Image: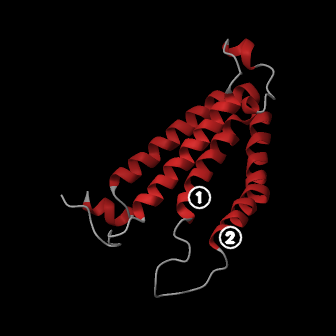
Amino acid sequence: MRRLSQSYGAHPAHLVSLLASFVVAGYAAFRLLPQDALGLAVWFVGTAIVHDLVLLPAYAAVDRLVHGPRVDRPEGPPKRLWANYVRVPLALSGLLLLVYFPAILRLSSGFEPTTTLSSDGYLWRWLAITAVLFALGGLAYVIRQRPGRSRGASVPT
């Protein structure tokens, strides 16, 4: 086991989880390819292009706006302590919007006949989840900034 860890460079559980993810991805590709190979290829290339040319610059720009210009300061705390408490809820909310945007924006017409579920309420549920995520981020920030709390203190066991 130790020899495997040294030659692989990580814990064997990492290798097992990586292989399991390849098995799941292979199974999904096996199920999708016979049905619509061209559509899957177009979707894959399209998502790669949209991510690299649109989404990556967009969230890099938002991150730059939140953090401000990079200044290497070896001493002192980070410049904007609140940034991660905004970044995480924003990323999770954006991911939910990306996954469910056809239902949220009522762009999908085949949703109800296929699933027999109503598409009403997706917008309000997404807005409520987003509000809860930002409220939890704000609460975590307030708790972390309490007076008398030391920065490097560990939780007693």
Q: Quadrant of the N terminus?
A: bottom left
**Residue 93: x %, y % from top left:** 62, 45
The circle on residue 21 is none
**Residue 146: x %, y % from top left:** 39, 64
Rendering quarter of residue 25:
top right
The circle on residue 87 is 1
Drawn side of residue 4 relative to residue 118, left or right = left
Nearest the camera: 51 or 151? 151
Q: Secondary structure at mark 1?
A: helix
Question: Can you say whether 107 is above or below 129 in the image?
Answer: above
The circle on residue 64 is 2
Crowd tier of the residue under label 1, counting other residues whose Cα lies within 10 Å: few below 14, some 14–19, many 20 or above: some
Q: CA distance from mark 2 to mark 1?
A: 11 Å
**Residue 102: x %, y % from top left:** 76, 32
The mark that comes first in sequence, 2 or 1, is 2
**Residue 19: x %, y % from top left:** 45, 45
